Image (tube, rainbow, N blue to C red):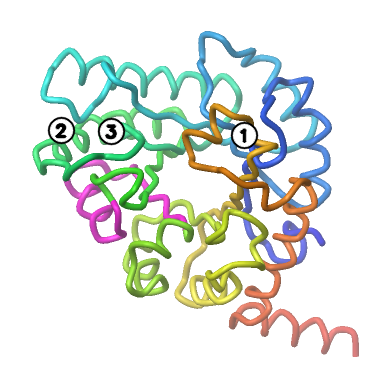
Amino acid sequence: MNLDLDLDLDVAFHVSIALADASPVALAPLLHELRGAGYRRAVLPPMNPQETDAAGLRRVFDEADIVPIAMTGQQPGADVSSEDSAERRAGADALRAAVEFAAAIGADQLNGVPYGLFGPPGGPTPFAAVERAAREVGLVADEAAARGITMTFEVLNRYETSALNTAAQALDFVALSGSDDLRIHLDTFHMAVEEADMSAAIRAALPKLGYLELGQSGRGYLGSGAVDIPAVVQTAIDDGYTGRWGVEAFSRGLVGEPAADMLAIWRDPFDDGVALASDAVRVIRRGWAESTAGRRAQRLARSGAA
């Protein structure tokens, strides 16, 4: 099943689902398998630009005919939401370094949580901190766009941040940023916790939605969990979403302990990331087939065959 030919959807796969080692040598065979399954892009885990073989990564992505998506974030002492000007500057510098790294590996998109620290928040985020972060992120997003890179920011659930938990808050953040280039990244895993009506939230975010990620409630196979992924796909397409899609799942044994601890991945809902990726294509196909565009394509195909 080839998404490029059959569905014409631009879908990215998180390579950390399949292996903890994101070195060029380890990635090369995986990327070829993903391309064969129909994926156009692969999302890399967060990497230290100074310690990563950017040229090697670009080479293996080019050879596999897959485009990388890079990720970025903030750290204590380098946080664009901080009251301290030096800390904000360090956070903005980290984001700019991530843009440089994305360009070096041939990425055209930069995902992540650029607006503050990731992890249990311990309390509400002051509005002033959100404003500070929005200004800094907006500036970097405009600089990234000038390099041909779309910068997105992921909306997380309440257990991972108190800054931005809903699509409505994300739209406010874009407005505060003053950027025409910054885009929203929604994830069904987080939306299942925070949104009263997931499809309505996606519909509201459409003008600024750049990346819609499909993740199941248990972080495993897209077809097994509390989130009706085919219905999300169908409704989003019918509502006019034409942007990129992502597939995300996590299994402790495949992610590796440091990342698994950070993401609270305590179980192994699957043991084969490529099998999960292939199954995700089938789940997405079910949603597409029920959409207006999908039904129309199927009618045309049947009439052509006749």
Q: What residue would you read off at disc 3?
A: 116
Q: Which of marks 1 and 3 precedes in the sequence?
A: 1
Cα distance between the residues tagged 1 and 2: 29 Å
Q: Which of marks 2 and 1 precedes in the sequence?
A: 1
The boundaries of the magenta stretch are 165-187
Q: Is residue 188 left or right of residue 78?
A: right
Classify the position of the N terminus by image quarter: bottom right
Q: Nearer the viewer, mark 3 or mark 2?
A: 3
Residue 180 part of the magenta-drawn span: yes
x 63%, y 40%: residue: 252
Cα distance between the residues tagged 3 and 1: 24 Å
Residue at the limit of the structure toward the front, as seen here: 266
Q: Are marks 3 and 2 in contact (CB under 8 Å)?
A: no
Give, as a three-letter code, the residue at label 1: Pro
Q: What residue would you read off at disc 1?
A: 68
Residue 111 on image: x %, y %: 46, 38
Cα distance between the residues tagged 3 and 2: 10 Å
Q: Are marks 1 and 2 in contact (CB under 8 Å)?
A: no
Give the answer, above or below, for where 84 lies relative to 155: above
